[in-house]
Each structure stands twice: as structure tokens, then as C-alpha cells.
Image (cartoon, rainbow, N blue to C red):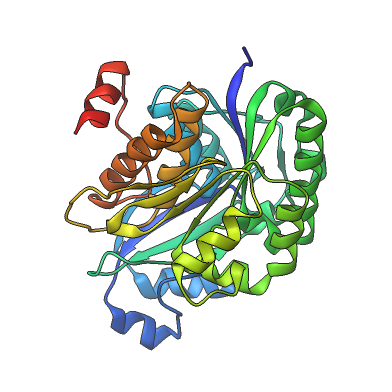
Amino acid sequence: MRQYDVYGLGNALVDIQYRVAPSFFEAMGIDKGVMTLIGEARQRALIQALGGREMARSSGGSAANAMIALVNCGGKGYCGCKVAKDADGDFYLRDLRAAGVASNPSNRGEGITGKCLVMITADADRTMNTFLGITSTFGPDQVEESVIAASQFIYIEGYLVATEDGFEAARVAQQVAQERGTKVALTLSDPSVVAAFKDRMVALVDAGVDMLFCNEDEAAMFADAETTEAAFEVLSGRVARLALTRGATGAWVCDGRDVLHAPGFEVEAVDTNGAGDAFAGAYLFAITHGYDAARAARLATCVSSQVVAKYGPRFERKLNAADIAHLLDL
């Protein structure tokens, strides 16, 4: 038995959530539906323009959200991240700890803690404008070899490849994991990241990935495919296991032998932010606790649908074994 089920590595960002109209994107020159990296001055200007529409704040980032979902399913997660010695950094670590996710509070430095403006529109789409701040310097020095060795999986968030330090941290963590017998999971994170840093994503996949998570757009971008079916065929031939989410219609998974379809759960979608992270966290919980791919995918689609049905990127419901059995029988 290892101490942790999953060690997630990613950008530590205070998520600030807003509800906006599409006209705001037009007025401010924002690309809808994707994550865009911006500078501090630009983010300050957007916050001022958004005024009093802030809905909530939370410790976020893809890896953190996935670890929170894993923990709330009953798993043990650790989040490798870096925050500044400022009020937002204090908030981030306090909030992460309150969610039950372990971390290293010494991974701090002088600077500004990263923030992500998460703007939700009436169609439930999420648009993110991110100032990375000090998390842009998350690098090999923050990779904790002892935690990798104590984990069944590492989970690398694809957003890390957007910086030289982050990409090197991902490569080092992947290599250490392979040396220590720890499995490697990777998420492609966002189609804009795949498009801009495809060579780095390919390098990670080619170096060996045991579990790949992606959605339809990310898969098509990575595989240079015109259809989801073609993208799935390409990706399933390059990684040991694959989970491709398809929104309301569920997910396709490949466990190395069989291809399975997990149907979606019918909910009224209000906010898709964090759905993919919750899917990954729940799926990783399941496969590290003896569930097969079919049941893992069913649990993950159910968990992610519950995130979509509310505002905010987290799966915050605490599940016990009876809850999970009930969800799997729905």
C-alpha cells in the first residue's frame, strides 16, 4: 500500500468565478470558451471591468480540482504546486488543506500567487483568463521524489507545458515515476494549449503515459483528426489507457484491451468549468481502488455531471462506499 493514490502536479491558481454575458467578451477582446494566458496588468483591468460580479473564490487549477474530486470520492491525494508569500497564497493553501488534499507549504516564494478569472456564460461554457504569477516558476525543484514514490499515480496537468519550467517539471516527474514504479497520468487540459505546445505534449506522450485524459476538441487537435472516432483510434494506439470525454453524451474509454462507452447523465448544465478535472479525479480514484474501466467511467461521468449542474469547478460532495455503489447502479 502506498501513502497516496495520486500525486497531482499543476499550476496553483486562485479561481475567481464570474457570471457574464457574451457581449463582455466582445467588448474586452476575449476569446470565448478557451483558456488564455494574460499579464498582470491585463488581469487587473479585467477585474476592474467585471466589477462586483464575483461569485466565489477557491483554490484551483486542474490538478487541484482533480485531487479534490479524488479525495471526496474517498481517495488520498497530494497536490504539488507553488504559491507566493502573500494573502492569496495563504488562502490557497488553507483552502486546499480544508478540502482534504495534502501539499507542501514550503513551496512558496516572493512574488504574486497566480489567479484565474473563470467567466461563465448562460450556455454553461467557461472562459478562462489566467495570470500565472509565481506558479510560472513551478519547476523541477518543486517535484518531490519521495511523494512520487509514495503514490500509485502521478497526474500531470497539461497546462504545465505552457512554461519552460513547467514542462521540465513534468518531464522530471514522469521519469522519476517510471523509475519508482509509479504510473503516469496526463491530461491534455485545453485545445488552445495543445495547439500552442503540441510538440511538448507529444514528447510527454511518446515518453510513456499509462492514462490519458482529454475531451473531443483536445483529442482532435492532438491527433490532427477530423472526427472524434479517428482521434480516439490514434490516441488509443499511443497510450496504455485512454478516457475521452464527450460532454452530455458521456465518455469513451479504452483500458488497453476493450473500448467502452459510458453514457452521460441528464442534468441541467449551468457551468462546465472543472467537469474534466472532476472526471479525471473520480476515474483515478476508481482505478486505484480496484474498479474496472467500465465502472470507473460510470462513476466519473456521474461525478462530472454533478459538477456541471452547479456553479464552481469542484466536486464537493463527500462519498462513502454506499454512495458510490448507489451511483454505479443508477
> Is residue 40 visible to us here?
no
The residue at the far top in this view is 1
**Does 288 sit left or right of 263 as displayed?**
right
Residue 160 locus on image (x, y percent): 67, 55
When asked about the image quadrant of residue 198, the answer is bottom right
Is 287 above or below relative to 11? above
Q: Nearer the viewer, residue 272 or 250?
A: 250
Q: Position of residue 47 (x, y in %)?
A: 43, 68
Picture coordinates of residue 6, whole percent (x, y): 58, 30
What residue appears at the point 19 percent right and 34 percent down from the top-left corner?
330
On screen, residue 305 versus residue 46, left or right, reads left
Please tell me which residue lies in front, 74 or 132: 74
Please report the residue visible at 55 percent of the width from the left and 44 percent of the height from the top. 63
Residue 82 placement: quadrant: top right
Tell whether 129 sits left or right of 132: left
Judged left or right of residue 7, residue 311 is: left
Which of 295/84 is in front?
295
